[in-house]
Amino acid sequence: MSSSTAASRTEPIADAAPLSLCAREPHVPADRLVAEMVPPPRFDSVRFSTYIPDPNQPSQSEAVRVLEGFATGLGGAQAGGRRGFLGFGRSKAPKTPAGPRGVYLDGGYGVGKTHLLASLWHATPAEPSLKAFGTFVELTNLVGALGFQQTVQTLSGHRLLCIDEFELDDPGDTVLVSTLLGKLVEAGVALAATSNTLPGRLGEGRFAAADFLREIQGLSAHFRTLRIDGEDYRHRGLPEAPAPYTDAQVTKAAYATSGASLDAFPELLDHLARVHPSRYGALTDGLKAVCLTDVRPVPDQSTALRLVVLADRLYDREVPVLASGLPFDKLFSEEMLKGGYRKKYFRAISRLTALARDAASLVQDQ
């Protein structure tokens, strides 16, 4: 049953019908792309003090200690222009130091890398306009919107650039961003990054430091690697993915929840193909919940990768997802889960599962 059919059999409860993601075609100006390079809403309040290290994983506590020192050192430029931790900071006549200019957080999904990266951004003693935080995809989108030279000029005045989920599976974009980072290092910008693993190497382990340092080539000497061991925190002692609801339950919840959207999953997948992934954040603006009917396996890899981006944006914004059809751990085929993008798909499953748990109250409150 499609969402429209389900909706027609449900007496509206809210003052207005649910929103529809499929009806949205956002256009994002370039200046918004720059202004929004801050930690996403989910990480607004995270700090080093709110990161709870696993006592069985000493590398987690060590990462917090090193990053706290890293952030403190970045304040050196404000105290007489002296160089700070690991050679960071600005002087009136900046020179590129020989030592590391950045940190790379190396670990599997769900060990808190983004939490730590956002905590570094918050702890760095500089105005928000002098710090930038974004995913690799958001950074490449910024270059596409502004052009390479304008992006260099825009970011060169920053104290810190944080790049989450540095993509190693697109050689062209990797070279582009590596070249950009080289220019920013020359300008005195501090760098911090996390990354995914290269296709075909996921069976060799969870960690991508060697791949990352090789792919950024000349920049590798500027990064210190912090390895963060641990299991996906979203699965520590938590139940498996919740069972999906019925179409009627999802539709009723959508009508009962102000600011909720309601779409049939197959139609949403088709719509995502017509919206550039750089706009998926804007696609979710103002949503309080996403309600989906008829969830089924994604048909191909291109569609699956677009869904991964949407899942990331929803997770960043803490938008609960209520769904009927198949549970989220059945979205991707066995072939996909064994292939080069395996880590992305498992991350999407993990995040959508967490959002599905968050959505349970939408049905319980009816």
Image (cartoon, rainbow, N blue to C red):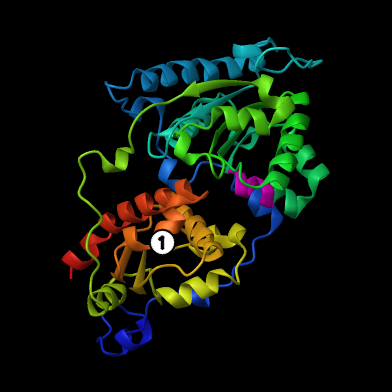
Magenta range: 135-141
Would residue 137 be counted in the magenta stretch?
Answer: yes
Q: Quadrant of residue 166?
A: top right
At 60% across and 32% down in the image, what residue appears? 212
> Which quarter of the image is occupied by the C terminus?
bottom left
Q: Is residue 84 visible?
A: no
Q: Quadrant of residue 189?
A: top right
In the image, residue 362 lies at what x, y percent?
24, 65
Q: Residues within 10 Å of mark 1 (few under 14, many from 20)?
A: some
Viewer-nearest residue: 250 or 126: 250
Query: Is the stretch drawn in magenta largely helix, strand or loop?
Result: helix
Left or right: where 240 falls relative to 110: left
In the image, residue 305 lies at what x, y percent?
53, 58
341 above or below 74?
below
Left or right: where 345 falls relative to 366: right
Viewer-nearest residue: 365 or 267: 267
Would residue 170 be counted in the magenta stretch?
Answer: no
Viewer-nearest residue: 329 or 233: 329
At 58% across and 72% down in the image, what residue appears? 25
At 33% across and 62% down in the image, what residue appears? 330
Give amino acid for label 1: Ser
> Which quarter of the image is occupied by the N terminus?
bottom left
304 above or below 144?
below
At 55% across and 28% down in the image, what residue appears? 209
Q: Is residue 290 visible?
A: yes
**Residue holding disc 1:** 333
In the image, residue 311 lies at what x, y percent?
44, 56
Q: Which element type, helix, strand or loop, lies under badge 1?
A: loop
In the image, residue 297 lies at what x, y percent?
39, 68
Viewer-nearest residue: 340 or 126: 340
